[in-house]
Image (cartoon, rainbow, N blue to C red):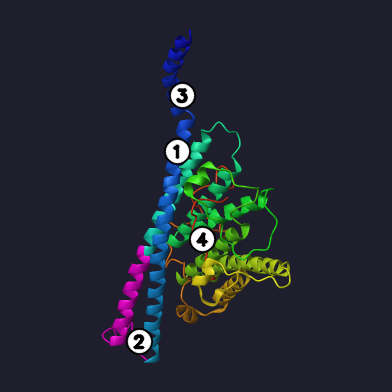
Amino acid sequence: MKNSILWLAWCCLPVFAVSYHYGPGQEWLARDRAAGLIREATQLSLVAESEQELAYESQLVMLNARREAFLEGVDWQTTSEHPLSIAVQEATTQQQAAYAKAADSWNRTSEVYLDATELLLDTLDKSSEPVLSESDQNLLESLRWAEARAMVRSGYVFDGVEQLQALLDLRLASATDQPLVPTTSTRPVSISAADSLTQQPSGTSRNLPTSAIREELAAAQYIGARLLREEGRSPEVWKPIANLARQQYRYLADRSTTVSKTRQPGQQRQATPSEDIADERLSSGDRVQRNLEQVLNLERSSSEQLEGIPLPRQAPMARRPGDGPPGDKPGKGPGRGPLRDGPPGDGAGIPRPYGAGW
């Protein structure tokens, strides 16, 4: 009798294996593939950041070449044979090539983040769970955030603005959003790709701060306004977008002041890793204040003055063809569609937000 039971159990094992493979096993396989895509996107973002830095440095070289030509009274556009004019032309060519390379890397990064997000969403759609777990919701949110910032840097500025705006709207409408607490960084907590797809986070806090979403949105709006102005668009087109960026930074500056007052007397502020790379080791409040001033300078500067001001460190040199227009409601361009399953939260190796200012 005992042997019969054992033989029956042995014969049933393939049935259980097949059932698991085409049931929960498919979900875990899809999650594993999504984790692989997240790791790929993370590596691509590191390459893109390096190329973006080289592009920014090439921009500074170009601006310095133009400045030298101007101080020597050389019109580099009409006296093309002059050595200073040649230097400007060479620097401009190098700048264009560097920005094109960086933009392509950011575009590839955003596409891989999108692939990971869609794979995870398809998996969750087929899941037997009726409601998203907090860890899945947080991960989806951070993937959308990372994708949007890569879109902005690749040149799909207003597509990225729309996605960041939708992310912020969903976060503000969420009843689980946490109250403001003292912090020294808007960077989300980084966890591994595999763990983020399989484990629940401790507690109920959001890993991606609302301030990180808002600050990235403000930067994208400023970049959009700046590029629209350089395209020759009328003030009626770019000024409303610059005004939105100013409002976002003003809100962040006011909140930063509130947070700083909540610190205990004598409490020392610790510099974040991103600030160690930057000059002057700016605090979050100082970074926001400086960026607010940059928005005001955009609104006040003449076209001639603007030519001598470099683009933000993480900005593309131009918008890509097909980028959503600002439209009647700035920040509400066509984009890549809604967030489907609602806010998503923190994720796997998500790149950090803007460092210590622009």
The residue type indicated by label 4 comes to: Arg
The numbered mark at residue 30 is: 1
Q: Which residue is mark 3?
A: 19
Give the percent coordinates (x, y) of residue 320.
41, 60
**Disc 3 packing (10 Å; few <14; some 14–19; many ≥20):** few
**Disc 2 packing (10 Å; few <14; some 14–19; many ≥20):** some
Q: Are marks 1 and 3 in contact (CB under 8 Å)?
A: no
Vertical comparison of 262 with 344: above or below: below
How far apart marks 4 and 2 lie (CA) works out to 41 Å
Q: Which residues are magenta?
A: 73-101
> Which secondary structure type mostly characterizes the magenta part of the structure?
helix
Residue 78 falls left or right of residue 266:
left
Vertical comparison of 207 with 249: above or below: above
How far apart marks 2 and 1 lie (CA) works out to 59 Å
Give the mark nearest the N terminus, 2 or 1.
1
Q: Which residue is mark 2?
A: 75
Magenta stretch holds residue 18? no
Give the mark nearest the N terminus, 4 or 2.
2
The residue type indicated by label 3 comes to: Ser
Tell me the element at label 2: loop
Q: Nearer the viewer, residue 17 or 114?
A: 17
Q: Are marks 4 and 2 in contact (CB under 8 Å)?
A: no
The residue type indicated by label 2 comes to: Asp
Give the percent coordinates (x, y) of residue 326.
52, 60
Q: Is residue 321 visible?
A: no
Give the mark nearest the N terminus, 4 or 1.
1
Q: Are marks 4 and 1 in contact (CB under 8 Å)?
A: no
